[in-house]
Image: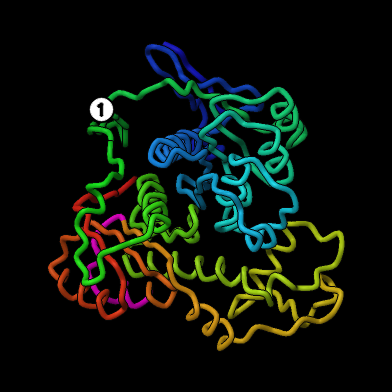
Amino acid sequence: MEKLELKYGLNPNQKDAYVYRECGLPIDVLNGRAGYINLLDALNGWQLVSDLKAATGFPSACSFKHVSPAGAAVGVPLTENEKRMYFVKDNPSPLAAAYIRARGTDRMSSFGDFIALSDICDVSTAAVIAKEVSDGIIAPGYEVEALSLLKAKKHGNYTIIQIDSAYKAEETEKRTVFGITFSQQRNDFMPGDETFSNPVTKRREIPESAHLDLIVSLLTLKYTQSNSVCLAFHGQTTGVGAGQQSRLHCTRLAADKSDIWQLRQCEKVLSLPFKKGLSRNDKDNVIVQYLSPEPEIDVIESWREYFTVKPDPMSADEKREYLLSLSGMSLASDAFFPFPDNIIRAERSAVSYISQPGGSIRDDLVIEEADKAGIVMFMTGKRLFHH
């Protein structure tokens, strides 16, 4: 039996924490010391990026916090607007672009994340990570210079895990809760052509870009604490609503986050006159406050702290008009929509394509609402709860 001792369990008072496997562990801690939650994030994140790479062929990355992805993405090139939004000036590698996108979904939630990469961490990706506040990383390998950059983080205590990319888990997974062992077959769902073979709306065709976005959404949900809803665009998540008891609350949370992501690309926000020397994290926080309907800090009134000149506020009408001008967002849900109110909320966030399992007694009303909105909706018959 191979055993890896952890810093502590879920909380510091939960001592004597470790992971083990009878026939050897597929992970090696190259730097730092992993915690219990770190490993939960790392192993769930590794499964997500492995699935994304297998399903799309793109290098993939995710940013995990408290056993749900704050964001996930594949390594398609950044658009010029995305470069401006993410404060990127060079041309990152595909893997680095994937992490920039994953972190960019919800940078506030990703603060102190655990990173998972599908491919060997290159210098381009490590250079991006070096500037972020992060707890650790898991990848199948590291270039020598990339490893050196990462080892310098957190005063040399940054957690770096290498996983054997050839490792395959057993078909049956187990966990113990309150002295009782649960056993089940692993969730082996992978989206394929059959996943999108059952459009139930009048509109039935989707572009390849939306096909990619629905795959990203569905696989993200596979590793997100339920209930959950995910929006995606251009190969990345734009809003993840995780761990809500109400399906509508999932949709609202994911859509609200996605709205912030979209609004960050409007020219008024891209052109905010930031002072030189303001960190990227400070800029991100200021933008969130600037766009918030009820900001904790009035960045307009205290503008001298952040801006060279006082910017105009963005009114609710301006935000609404901008969002209504958009379309083409994809949304997936890990379980059926019980009421059409979810579709109404999704439409307000430029959703044009939806994937959900179906099976509600009100499926007909949900489909009717999607038809009113001109949305293409698929029913997959596959629920994706994750706990």
Check residue 341 for magenta coloring.
yes
Extent of the magenta region = 334-345
Check residue 257 for magenta coloring.
no
Q: What colour scheme governs how the chains and residues are painted in the rendered image of this protein? A: rainbow
Name the quadrant containing residue 96: top right
Which residue occupies 34% across, 65% down? 353
Which quadrant does the C terminus fall into? Answer: top left
Image spot of residue 166 (x, y percent)? 43, 20
Q: Tag 1's secondary structure?
A: strand
Q: Mark 1 — residue? A: 172
Which is more toward the observer, 182 or 84? 84
* Mark 1, other Cα within 10 Å: few <14 / some 14–19 / many ≥20: few
Which quadrant does the N terminus fall into? Answer: top left
Which residue occupies 41% across, 57% down? 242
Which is more toward the observer, 30 or 346? 346
108 over 297 or under it: above or below: above
Which is more toward the observer, 155 or 218? 218
Q: Amino acid at mark 1?
A: Thr
Which residue occupies 69% across, 61% down? 84
